[in-house]
Image (cartoon, rainbow, N blue to C red):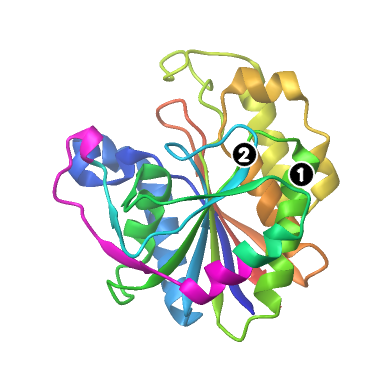
């Protein structure tokens, strides 16, 4: 059963060990993540299913990172001390693997002990109160069509709702990277357009709004939130959900959004 669902950013600057003095500029996001961590704890999850990707992206297939143990690795940003460990949920992974064999959507398995910042940042911030060896299922999106991402989410939902385990879903991504002139990708007017559309689609819990977003605008904004949101919306489709935007800010030109999807 699905007992918790959220969307979070994964900026490395959210960790003080990396962001240093810049982390303070993201206080609204950090406060929202703290609140979300309390909600996650209260949901008593047996397993956390993450939806994100950076290092493990496959252009033409969705993927599951299946390994006997995991550790967070953000050493590429100079942080060699953050090394939280997690275990796989073999039962849920096996169910996903078996189900995908009978589906037409391309799907593959990876095996990597290290979790990069796309998964590692939200897990570090949200699981402090949970057992350090909590079980996870790391799912990566692909570069297939938007409709394929929604369908993949629907399949994952069917698997999760049939499980007796309490499953928390954490989808992660940063919104536009082009919101200001000092943004990592520079300024582009599509940045604000994309972020406004994503926030509205969440507030309205509107899959159609998310699907109707302009492809050129998405590309120009250089966001990495649309695909994980599509999977998440597929997983929550037809469920009694109350969305709540906990925070949104962009002090460094990259949209940072924290949202919870309350399951009624």
Residue farthest along the bottom direction in this orientation? 164
Q: Secondary structure at mark 2?
A: loop
Q: Is residue 45 left or right of residue 131?
A: right
State the SS at label 1.
helix
Q: Is residue 83 magenta?
A: yes
The quadrant holding residue 13 is top left
Please say whether residue 212 is visible from this viewpoint: yes
Q: Position of residue 102 (x, y in %)?
A: 76, 60
Which labelled disc corresponds to residue 148? 1
Q: Which residue is located at x 52 percent, y 76 percent?
A: 91
Q: Are marks 2 and 1 in contact (CB under 8 Å)?
A: yes
Residue 21 location, x and y as percent? 20, 36
Mark 2 Cα-neighbour bin, 10 Å: few <14, some 14–19, many ≥20? many
The residue wearing badge 2 is: 142
Q: Position of residue 215 (x, y in %)?
A: 75, 24
In the image, residue 126 lies at what x, y percent? 38, 63
In the displayed structure, would residue 20 be above or below residue 182?
Answer: below
Q: Residue at x 59, y 44 (%)?
A: 141
Crowd band around label 1 with a 10 angstrom C-alpha radius: few (<14), some (14–19), many (20+): many
Which residue: 57% across, 30% down? Answer: 223
Q: Does residue 77 belong to the magenta stretch?
A: yes
Which of the pair 59/149 is nearer the observer? 59
In the image, the segment drawn in magenta is: 75-96
Earlier sequence position, callout 2 versus callout 1: 2
**Above/below status of 150 relative to 5:** above
* Viewport quadrant of the C terminus: bottom right
């Amino acid at each position: 059963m699905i007992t918790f669902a959220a969307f979070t950013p994964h900026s490395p600057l959210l960790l003080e060990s990396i962001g240093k003095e810049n982390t303070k500029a993201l206080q609204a996001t950090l406060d929202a993540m703290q609140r979300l961590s309390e909600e996650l704890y209260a949901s008593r999850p047996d397993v956390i299913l993450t939806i994100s990707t950076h290092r493990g992206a496959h252009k033409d297939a969705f993927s599951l990172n299946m390994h006997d143990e995991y550790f967070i690795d953000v050493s590429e940003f100079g942080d060699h001390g953050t090394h939280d460990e997690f275990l796989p949920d073999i039962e849920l992974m096996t169910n996903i693997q078996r189900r995908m064999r009978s589906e037409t959507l391309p799907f593959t398995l990876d095996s990597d002990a290290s979790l990069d910042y796309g998964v590692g940042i939200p897990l570090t911030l949200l699981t402090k109160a949970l057992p350090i060896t909590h079980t996870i299922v790391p799912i990566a999106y692909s570069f297939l069509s938007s409709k394929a991402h929604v369908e993949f989410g629907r399949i994952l939902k069917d698997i999760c709702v049939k499980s007796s385990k309490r499953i928390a879903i954490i989808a992660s991504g940063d919104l536009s990277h082009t919101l200001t002139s000092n943004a990592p990708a520079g300024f582009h007017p599509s940045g604000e357009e994309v972020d406004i559309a994503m926030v509205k689609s969440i507030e309205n819990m509107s899959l159609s709004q998310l699907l109707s977003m302009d492809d050129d605008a998405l590309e120009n904004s250089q966001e990495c939130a649309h695909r994980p949101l599509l999977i998440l919306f597929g997983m929550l489709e037809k469920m009694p959900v109350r969305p709540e935007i906990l925070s949104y800010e962009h002090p460094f030109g990259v949209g940072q959004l924290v949202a919870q999807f309350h399951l009624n």
